[in-house]
Image: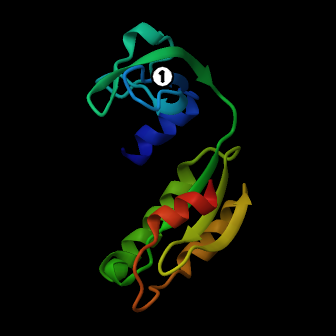
C-alpha cells in the first residue's frame, strides 16, 4: 500500500470492524477483524454490508455478523526487524518509518519496538511524531540475533 493510499484511506476513517464466526471450525467463536475496504481505484468504501463480505478460514466460510465504520483513533505498534537479516535494508527502513510517521494522521498513537533477539520498547505509545522519528533514525542492527516476531505481537498487544 502506498503512503498516499494509506493517508487517503485513514483520512476517510474507512476502518471496518467485523465480527466473524467460523461455523464449521471445531473451535468456533466470535472474532473481531479490522480491515480497510477500497474499490479498484483505491477509493474507500464506507457502506459495505455483512452480506457483501466473504471470509474463509482453513477452507471454511465464516459468517460475518456485523460490519461498521470505525473512526476511533488507533494504537499502532511499529515492530522493526533489526536483526542481522535487516542489515542491507536499514537505511531504507529508517526512511520508510519516517515517511509513515509523516503520513499517519496525528490522532493515532504509535509505539516503536525492535524485535531482534528480544522485544525492546524504544518509544511507548505516543502521538509525538518527532520523538518517534528521532528514535527511528537511531536504530541499528542487533548483531547475532534472530527476529522474535511472535513475541513482538504478544508483548505489544
Can you give x and y, in whole percent of width and height, for residue 99 in the image?
49, 59
Display coloring = rainbow
- Residue 123 vertical position relative to residue 4 in the rendered view, above or below: below
Q: What residue do we see at 62% from left, 62% from top?
A: 155
**Residue ranking furthest to the front:** 26
Residue 13 falls in which quadrant of the image? top right
Q: Which residue is mark 1?
A: 21
Nearer to us in this view, 35 or 3: 35
Residue 43, position in %: x, y?
40, 24
Out of 137 and 116, give the one closest to the viewer: 116
Residue depicted at 39% across the width and 25% down the height:
38
Image position of 80 (left or right of 85): right
Describe the element under mark 1 as helix, strand or loop.
strand
Q: Quadrant of the N terminus?
A: top left
93 shown above or below 41: below
Q: Position of residue 58 (x, y in %)?
A: 30, 34
**Residue depicted at 52% across the width and 80% down the height:** 139
Q: Is residue 63 above or below residue 119?
A: above
Count numbered badges in the picture.
Answer: 1
Residue at 62% over, 59% down:
156
Q: Which quadrant would residue 12 be assigned to in this image?
A: top right
- Residue 28 percent location from the top left of the image: 47, 27
Q: Nearer the viewer, residue 96 or 30?
A: 30
Q: Residue furthest left?
A: 59
Amino acid at each position: 500500500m502506498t503512503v498516499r493510499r494509506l493517508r487517503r484511506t485513514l483520512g476517510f476513517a474507512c476502518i471496518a470492524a467485523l465480527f466473524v464466526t467460523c461455523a464449521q471450525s471445531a473451535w468456533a467463536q466470535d472474532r473481531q477483524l479490522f480491515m480497510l475496504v477500497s474499490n479498484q481505484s483505491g477509493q474507500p468504501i464506507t457502506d459495505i454490508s455483512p452480506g457483501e463480505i466473504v471470509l474463509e478460514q482453513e477452507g471454511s466460510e465464516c459468517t460475518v455478523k456485523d460490519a461498521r465504520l470505525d473512526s476511533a483513533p488507533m494504537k499502532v505498534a511499529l515492530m522493526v526487524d533489526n536483526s542481522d537479516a535487516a542489515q542491507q535494508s536499514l537505511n531504507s527502513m529508517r526512511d520508510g518509518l519516517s515517511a509513515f510517521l509523516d503520513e499517519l494522521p496525528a490522532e493515532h498513537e504509535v509505539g516503536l519496538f525492535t524485535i531482534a533477539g528480544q522485544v525492546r520498547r524504544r518509544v511507548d505509545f505516543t502521538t509525538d511524531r518527532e520523538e518517534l522519528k528521532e528514535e527511528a533514525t537511531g536504530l541499528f542492527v542487533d548483531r547475532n540475533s534472530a527476529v522474535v516476531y511472535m513475541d513482538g505481537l504478544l508483548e505489544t498487544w
